[in-house]
Amino acid sequence: MARLTTDQVKSIAHQIKEACEKYGWKYDVRGEVLTIHKYFTPGDLDGFRDADMEYYSIIGLLPRSRAGSDWGTEGVGSFVAHENGHFVMNRSGGNLNVLKCLAKL
């Protein structure tokens, strides 16, 4: 994988922030993990579906620079998220420079 330039790092971080704002998500950088989350009306299947369709367009912007995974609202977590109205996804293994830049925005 090619190294990202400083301008590329900043651009990707801003793209993630802007995508979160566009779709109504919040983000948090915790160490080497990007967490995104969105609230919707508890029990609202349309709100849940929208979140399920949107999340990858955000976390997918974070390039991987090492082994990692995506996890969060899936399996049993889907039922809980639908009932509680809170959808959460995480990505590990993302580019550390992008994460550092994103944390400062």
Image: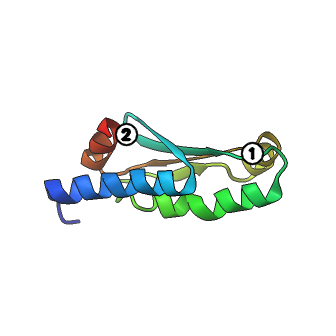
Q: Are marks 2 and 1 in contact (CB under 8 Å)?
A: no
In this rendering, is residue 50 above or below 89? below
Label 1, on which residue?
Answer: 81
Name the residue rendered at 46%, 57% in the picture: 19
Q: Is residue 81 left or right of residue 2?
A: right
For the residue pair 37 and 76, the one nearer the viewer reads as 37
Q: Is residue 97 left or right of residue 85?
A: left
Query: Which residue appears at 81% of the width and 57% of the height?
Result: 45
Left or right placement of residue 102 versus residue 6 in this view? right
* Placement of the C terminus among the 4 image quadrants: top left
Q: Position of residue 10 (x, y in %)?
A: 24, 52
User: How many C-alpha atoms fall within 10 Å of the one at disc 1: few (<14), some, or many (≥20)?
Assistant: many
Q: What percent of the width, then of the height, locates residue 100?
A: 28, 40
**Helix, strand or loop at disc 2?**
loop
Image quadrant in which the N terminus is located: bottom left
- The residue that appears at 17% across and 60% down in the rendered structure is 3
**Residues packed near mark 2 inside 10 Å, few (<14), some (14 to 19) or many (20 plus):** some
Q: Which comes before the other along the chain, label 2 or label 1?
A: 2
Given residues 38 and 1, the one toward you in this image is 38
Task: Specify the amino acid type for callout 1.
Answer: Ala
Any mark on residue 32, and which? 2
Question: Can you give x and y, in whole percent of width and height, for residue 31 in the image?
Answer: 37, 34
Amino acid type shown at disc 2:
Glu
What secondary structure is found at the residue carrying circle 1? helix
